[in-house]
């Protein structure tokens, strides 16, 4: 038996298993969406209110008070500022590098599992199309075995095969929408954290010596934070 016949025999099994795979991937994508939605919802951040509270403390050099404000503030962005405040005694450069490292870490954590949504959105239609092709192969094979009057049966088989393509699109569209939404939120969070970093650095033009440097143990205990 040559390779073509082997592949044909596999194709004659139809595309039912492809539908099962798409349903499984759909359930997995919904689980990822809900998990990421929970994370981003818990990280809601009132930027302007926080800046109006923290900037006077930074201007006055009240590092401990500013660190306490960051620790109690909701959202992910204050974590970046808090990382810089922990390094103010070592100077501007150390604080800047520490905040940048924290931004990178935060981005990696928030981007977790988003690649799955992006890949699913890009490939689910092709998986559905593959199932449709298998279904059409099966339908034409049935036609070859039918003596007369096989047209309606083939049309019915092709219609059933097209369901796989429709399901693939149904799985892909929400995944793409969720991927784009979460990436926009991620970009916003990183931009806000960058703004907080620049605000702190404006008050650290030169190395500072402080006696009361905040020492905040990690991981943070605030609900909605990532460690």
Image (tube, rainbow, N blue to C red):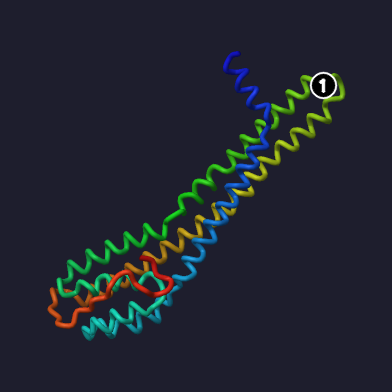
At horizontal 53% and vertical 44% (from top left) the residue drawn is 122
Please state the horizontal and vertical placement of residue 112, each as a whole percent of the image.
Answer: 42, 55
Q: Is residue 56 above or below residue 85?
A: below
Relative to 54, residue 12 above or below = above
Say which quadrant the N terminus sits in.
Answer: top right
Left or right: 74 as drawn, with respect to 194: right
- For residue 152, which quarter of the picture? top right
Residue position for label 1: 146
Most extreme residue toward the top is: 1
Using the image as rendered, state which of residue 45 and residue 67 is in the foreground: 67
- Which one is nearer the viewer's eye here, 209 or 24? 24
* Residue 107 higher or lower than 23, as above or below: below
- Image coords of residue 66 (percent x, y): 28, 81
In which quadrant is the C terminus drawn? bottom left
Give whichever of 91, 22 is nearer the camera. 22
- The percent coordinates of residue 43 (x first, y second) are 44, 70
Tally of numbered discs: 1
Characterize the local packing of mark 1: few (<14), some (14-19) or many (20 or more) Cα atoms within 10 angstroms. few
User: What residue lies at 53% left-to-right and 58% top-to-bottom?
Assistant: 33
Q: What residue do we see at 85% from left, 19% from top?
A: 147
Query: 19 or 176, which is in the foreground?
Result: 19
Quarter occupied by residue 85: bottom left
Relative horizontal placement of residue 190, taking residue 59 as reference (left or right): right
What element does badge 1 sit on? Answer: loop
Q: Is residue 29 above or below residue 7?
A: below
Q: Quadrant of residue 86?
A: bottom left
């Amino acid at each position: 038996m040559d390779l073509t016949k082997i592949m044909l025999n596999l194709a004659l099994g139809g595309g039912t298993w492809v539908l099962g795979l798409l349903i499984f991937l759909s359930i997995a994508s919904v689980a990822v969406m809900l998990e990421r939605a929970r994370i981003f919802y818990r990280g809601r951040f009132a930027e302007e209110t926080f800046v109006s509270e923290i900037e006077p403390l930074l201007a006055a050099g009240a590092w401990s008070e500013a660190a306490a404000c960051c620790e109690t503030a909701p959202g992910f962005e204050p974590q970046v500022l808090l990382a810089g405040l922990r390094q103010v005694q070592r100077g501007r450069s150390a604080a800047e590098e520490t905040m940048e490292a924290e931004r990178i870490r935060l981005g990696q954590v928030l981007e977790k599992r988003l690649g799955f949504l992006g890949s699913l959105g890009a490939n689910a239609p092709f998986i559905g199309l593959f199932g449709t092709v298998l279904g059409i192969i099966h339908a034409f094979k049935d036609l070859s075995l039918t003596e007369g009057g096989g047209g309606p049966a083939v049309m019915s088989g092709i219609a059933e095969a097209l369901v796989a393509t429709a399901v693939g699109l149904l799985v892909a569209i929400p995944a793409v929408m969720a991927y784009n939404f979460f990436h926009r939120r991620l970009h916003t969070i990183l931009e806000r954290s960058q703004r907080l970093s620049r605000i702190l650095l404006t008050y650290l033009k030169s190395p500072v010596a402080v006696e009361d440097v905040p020492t905040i143990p990690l991981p943070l205990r605030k609900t909605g934070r990532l460690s």
